[in-house]
Image: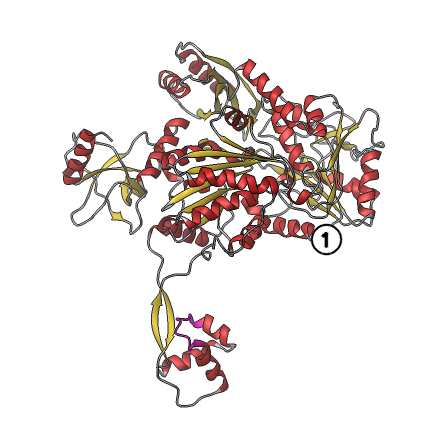
Amino acid sequence: MTEDSTDLFDDLFARRVVPVLVPMPAPKPYSYAVPEGMAVEPGSIVQVPLGPRQVLGVVWDGIDDGSVDPKKLKAITRAFDCPPLARDMRTFLDWVATYTVSPPGLVARMALRAPAAFDPEPMIEGLRLTDIRPERMTAARERVIATADNGFTWTRSGLAHAAGTSSSVIDGLTAQGVFETVFMPPPPVVALPDPDYTEHRLEGPQKQAALDLLESVDAGGFSVSLIDGITGSGKTEVYFEAIAATLKAGKQVLILLPEIALTASFLERFQDRFGSKPAEWHSDLAPRTREKVWRQVTEGGVRVVAGARSALFLPFENLGLIIVDEEHDPAYKQEDRVFYNARDMAVVRARIGEFPIVLVSATPSVESRVNGDLGRYNPIHLPTRFGDAALPDLGLVDMRKHPPERGGFLSPVLLRYIGKAVERGEQALLFLNRRGYAPLTLCRVCGHRFQCPDCSSWLVEHRFRGQIQCHHCGYAEKTPESCPECGTLDHLVACGPGVERIAEEVDRHFPDARTIVLSSDLMGVKRLRLELEAIAKGEADIVVGTQLVAKGHNFPMMTFVGIVDADIGLANGDPRAAERTFQLLSQVTGRAGRTGLKSLGLLQTYQPQHPVMQAIVSGDSDAFYEREISEREKALLPPFGRLASIIISADTRADAEGHARGLRQAAPKVSGISILGPAEAPLALIRGRHRFRLLVHGRRNSDMQAFVKTMMANGPKMRGSVSVQLDIDPQSFL
């Protein structure tokens, strides 16, 4: 704020009027009166009346014109005993709201995800040994007293467990005055990490990469480093050194991971290095655990958090380093309420906080690669695998020359190498990025196709569950026995493969092999973690999985990887299709041979000459990036241009199309910015709502936010069932 606005803000506080940002889609904070005796400051978390309800809010920066008599304002009803959101955090939330053109209250809401944590955690009742001894001594009592005779304070259950006795023995001693009751602070969610717990002996390129990274971290201030290393090259061990340096400086660390709920192996590697696990933050945490993590992060008790994209909005007390692992992963993009890319927003948070950030990937995004080439990021390259482990040999299986047997989807070449791996006692992985048994079911008599009644998508058969299901809205029905159109029995046919169908084919060819299917819709997170651990221990021979198998897992016995349909990601109009296919297939084939065993990866394709296929099997990633960057630059696509996607939906097609056309007509005339559409979205119907899309395209220096805000302000008002979703820098084009 300027000096004048600061004076006015101080004056408002003197008049006991403050702006409060509530977690609602309001365009700005509301003014509230501060009751006598209540102390608040910018960042204080409070409770305020909003209409008939009491809602949470944050005392915000800003000024009020003073036009409303403070006596007429509603008053704050409660100020929580909680550390206030720091100025850096408030600046970050404002920045995200402005960039994404989102209501600031909805952005602030993401930082207030644990309301029960706003009050201090209650103290815990503990016991401490006194000088009094019981009149009658028993063996159990002797054990309890000997255990507690160290000056420490114990919980009742903890002391009973340590002494190997029942809680009633503890109660009896307490009644006689042998123990006095004291109150202790609640235990930490995780133990403090020790940066000197173990010291990894990095070698060759890894050692040099760690030195380069530490140079950037130790320099202080804002910097972005991009660790670009092939799969298994030791990227994690390298950035562990930066974490250790940050911890020694007394600061906190945030590690973002695309699938933290599934990466138990990462948590174990962290514990091996630092002596304790990081605190986790993701949607599958128990509510009580989330509250404890949030509170202890704000108070500085938690030093390291490993979390999903939402962890970026935790109000750290003294954040000093952010790591974004697998920075290319689409899971960092949120597409609900506030549309943002956690990788890009993490860079902004580091810049505002003036501390370093490290982006990590074996297949960096084109945007990050360009920033590294232009010197905006500090590039750190790891060209070899850790411990001299060799990369897998890669090859293409031309499905035109080596087709599968009738009714199958695995070529004889793939089946031969699966068999060889199993015979050697090693593991094989088959990857297909398609859940369920088959993506389409139709009637061979009349041609009827089973489609979702609420979406413009086919129903996917899930044979393990006996259902056909829509993957967009969740609609499901029992797998039918007859065609609802013509009534014919036993003439329904499954078209195309999903992982369940590939597993069925594997079982037919290898009936004695232990086969596991990994798919997010087959089991919960806990079950998936157990399955991944079982694979890592060698308790499976053949793994059939969707894209979750590409999430950085370490399978020591995996020596063969087969891509069932390498072309699947190329068959759409997504401008990032080639990049994403290259990244995904590179990550999947990188699961093989990570411990030094000779390994092989084969890709089944009908387009062996496609540049993506050639880049993967040749190992020439530079050639792929050069070509992709050149194509983006010619078309002025990101990062050389800017995009904004506007999805207009309504209960009727006419309402959605009419509103979309009205927005198009209201668009300002700005040089360098053009609009495509409106046109029906590729998924024209989802959950019964009709969808039209406008795509705004501009040059890199275009003020996309101002353009879109003007168009929305001048366009038709949303009425009836019409809703508008705005996505700056879209990743999805459905």
Residue at 34% in and 71% down: 182
Q: Amino acid at mark 1?
A: Glu
Q: Using the image, determine if residue 40 lies above or below residue 372.
A: below
Q: How is the image coloured?
A: secondary structure
Chief secondary structure of the magenta span? Answer: loop
Q: Using the image, determine if residue 137 lies above or below residue 324.
A: below
Q: Residues within 10 Å of mark 1 (few under 14, many from 20)?
A: some
Of residues 453 and 9, the one drawn nearer to the viewer in this rendering: 9
Which percent across, then down, holds residue 71?
Answer: 14, 39
Residue at 38% in and 39% down: 109
Of residues 620 and 212, the one drawn nearer to the viewer in this rendering: 212
Which percent across, then down, holds residue 668?
Answer: 39, 12
Q: Which residues are magenta?
A: 148-156
Of residues 533 and 351, the one drawn nearer to the viewer in this rendering: 351
Q: Which residue is mark 1?
A: 539
Residue at 46% in and 57% down: 191
Q: Quadrant of residue 590?
A: top right
Which percent across, then down, holds residue 727?
Answer: 46, 26
Which percent across, then down, holds residue 458?
Answer: 65, 29
Can residue 11 be seen in the rendering of this structure? yes
Q: Is residue 457 left or right of residue 217?
A: right
